[in-house]
Amino acid sequence: MNKPVNRLGRGLSALIPPARQPGSTADAPAASGDPTSGLVESADRAPSRATPLDHAPAPAHGQVVLVPLDRISPNPLQPRTIFNDDSLRELADSIRSNGVLQPVLVRRASSDTYELVAGERRWRAAQLAGLDAIPAIEREINTRQAFELALVENLQREDLGALERAAAYQHYLDTFGGTTEDLAARLGESRANIANYLRLLKLQPELCFMLGRGELSMGQARALAGVADSERQLALAKLTASRNLSVRQVEALVRRAESVPTADPSADRAAAAAGEQRHLDELARAFSKALGTRVRIRRGRSKNSGTILIPYATIEEFDRIAQQVGAKTFLE
């Protein structure tokens, strides 16, 4: 009995070995580049090997069946959130000419519906091509495996966005727990590589847009993620983009910037309040000296408001203070 494979870094084939059926011509692999290659050549060129689901029993392990497109729902854990329209149209044109060369991978959602595990681009393109069904392989896969396989499929494509990849890593950790080391071991990735992508989640929204628009590279954005202050981070990002700085230059720029203390707004407000209170205390002492009694000044709730308190102990003291300020008294 073969030892189970725990690492998925080699692609979907680590979990889904190609099925070989007696008398089948599917032994010859299809075009390389897809982890499920070698399973079927085309839905319309291999009808004997792709069994329509409506007239077939539950598919055996590794059997390719034709599943109606409307019975398949997309993977809610799909890391990819952006599908290039031009690329999908090109794939749809290819499907019209050559059929679906490689099956999608699905898992059962109900008695007659399925959820995609891998192959969403083919599923979307098949709809654009006007197909009613698509070759599919069903596997008994739990949610965690489905997420891992969707990750692996997309990681093998260079056009997966850096932020999509970072968000997928974080979503996996939030959902299933574990450490970056655990995730790296399961996906066949390096821990440092995963950690670098996770750092991108510290970017403020404007930098995320710049990264998505291609104004910042992955390396530049990763370096800028180390800047804690949001305003400083944005300023350095704009400088990086305008001067097209190298990653090393950005890293040096970040080190210099982070060596300069960032102004703390709350500390500035506290310092300003303390300075104002010292000024009021000096005025209170001047009033006290002039009136011969202790005077207190309190700040009000609104700006530039307050109260001057002049206490007196006897009517005689009141008269004296009133005379000093030039006021008439009405107390006897």
Image (cartoon, rainbow, N blue to C red):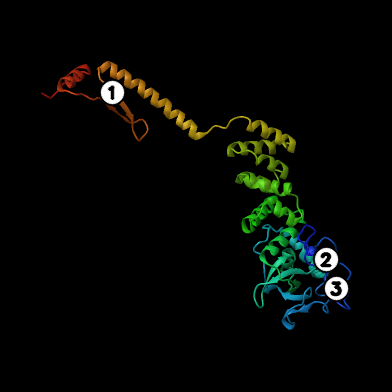
> Label 3 sits on what residue type?
Arg
Which amino acid type corresponds to the residue marked 2 in the rendered image?
A: Ser
Q: In what element is the residue under mark 2?
A: loop
Q: Position of residue 267 (x, y in %)?
A: 49, 32
Look at the picture and state if 150 lies above or below 61.
above
In contact (CB < 8 Å): disc 3 and disc 1: no
The residue indicated by pointer 2 is 37
Residue at which label 1 appears: 295
Element carrying mark 3: loop
In the picture as drawn, the residue positioned furthest to the bottom comes out as 55
Q: Mark 3 = which residue? A: 20
Contact (CB < 8 A) between labels 2 and 1? no
Looking at the picture, does residue 267 appear above or below residue 120?
Answer: above
**Element under label 1?**
loop
Quadrant the N terminus occupies: bottom right
Q: Is residue 315 above or below residue 55?
A: above
Tell me which numbered mark, 3 or 2, is placed earlier along the sequence.
3
Residue 307: percent from the left, percent from the top?
Answer: 29, 29
Front position among marks 3 and 2 = 3
